[in-house]
Amino acid sequence: MLNKSKILTLFKKDVLLEVRQQYSFYGILLYIVATIFVLFLAIEEPEKEVWNGLFWIIQLFVCINAVAKSFMQESKERMLYFYTISSPVHFVLAKLLFNSLLILLMTALSLILFFAFIGNPVQKLLPFIGLALLGGWSLSLVFTFLAAIAAKAQQNAAIMAVLGFPLIIPQLMLLMKLSNAAFSASLTVHWVDVILLVALDLLVGLLSVILFPFLWRD
């Protein structure tokens, strides 16, 4: 039985930790600003295909840097304390919620900086903004799920690399296909692909809720 108050309390805990450990947030912020500024100095206004590819590459690395630490920063003593006061479902849902909101914020910031420094070749602005936010949410769910598994393994980086590749490739292929349509007036965004992307997101969230309790016991 889900307890919304417990999920909200755990979510607030993550927010407070992020506020206190501001070096992490500002480190990601610096990465976004510096990377986009370097792109501006190097290529100024690239072609639409290059613009689209660069945007999703940056989003991928931002998500890895922001989300991968979410479980690894929890010490064994702290996890034992959470084990006594919360259920694994509440804990992982709070992590999914926090990481989703963090990546949505970073995605919105990346979009603003891309439009400001590298131009705006997007033909269908509103669909692309919605797709960018949906894509950021998708990436956050996948890497939160991977971080939960990797945090319980001895080879954290290796586990994330091995498990992440088959999970992230279908989402990236869908995102690239959908976003390419936003750069052309003649192409249309297929809602079937959008629904398929959302279905993959829900599947990842469901897997997190089902599998994390088994990791929690360890």
Image (tube, rainbow, N blue to C red):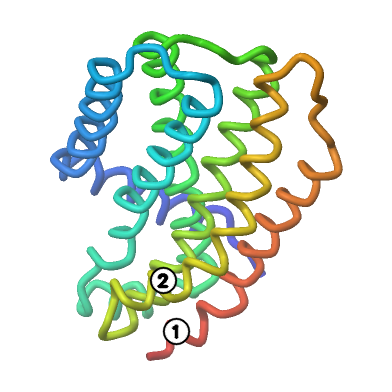
Q: Is residue 120 left or right of residue 193?
A: left
Q: Is residue 132 left or right of residue 18?
A: right
Estimate the x, y position of residue 125 in percent, counting from the top left.
Answer: 64, 14
On-image quarter of the N terminus:
bottom right
* Mark 2 surroundings: few (<14), some (14-19) or many (≥20) residues within 10 A: many
Compare marks 2 and 1 and give the one earlier in the sequence. Answer: 2
Q: Secondary structure at mark 1?
A: helix
Front-most of residues 166 and 2: 166
Q: Is residue 9 left or right of residue 170?
A: left
On-image quarter of the C terminus:
bottom left
The residue depicted at 52 percent of the width and 41 percent of the height is 136
Q: Is residue 209 left or right of residue 192?
A: left
Q: Is residue 179 above or below residue 24?
A: above
The residue depicted at 38 percent of the width and 70 percent of the height is 161
* Residue 148 circle label: 2
Q: Secondary structure at mark 2?
A: helix
* Mark 1 surroundings: few (<14), some (14-19) or many (≥20) residues within 10 A: few
Q: Is residue 108 above or below residue 27?
A: above
Query: In the image, what residue type sits under mark 2?
Result: Ala
Query: In the image, what residue type sits under mark 1?
Result: Leu
Estimate the x, y position of residue 56 in percent, counting from the top left.
Answer: 48, 38
The reply to whether the C-beta atoms of the residues labelled 2 and 1 are less than 8 Å apart is yes
The residue labelled by disc 1 is 215
* Residue 161 circle label: none
The residue furthest bottom is 218
The residue depicted at 63 percent of the width and 42 percent of the height is 175
Give residue 121's quadrant in the image. top right
Estimate the x, y position of residue 129 in percent, counting from the top left.
Answer: 60, 23
Front-most of residues 56 and 184: 184
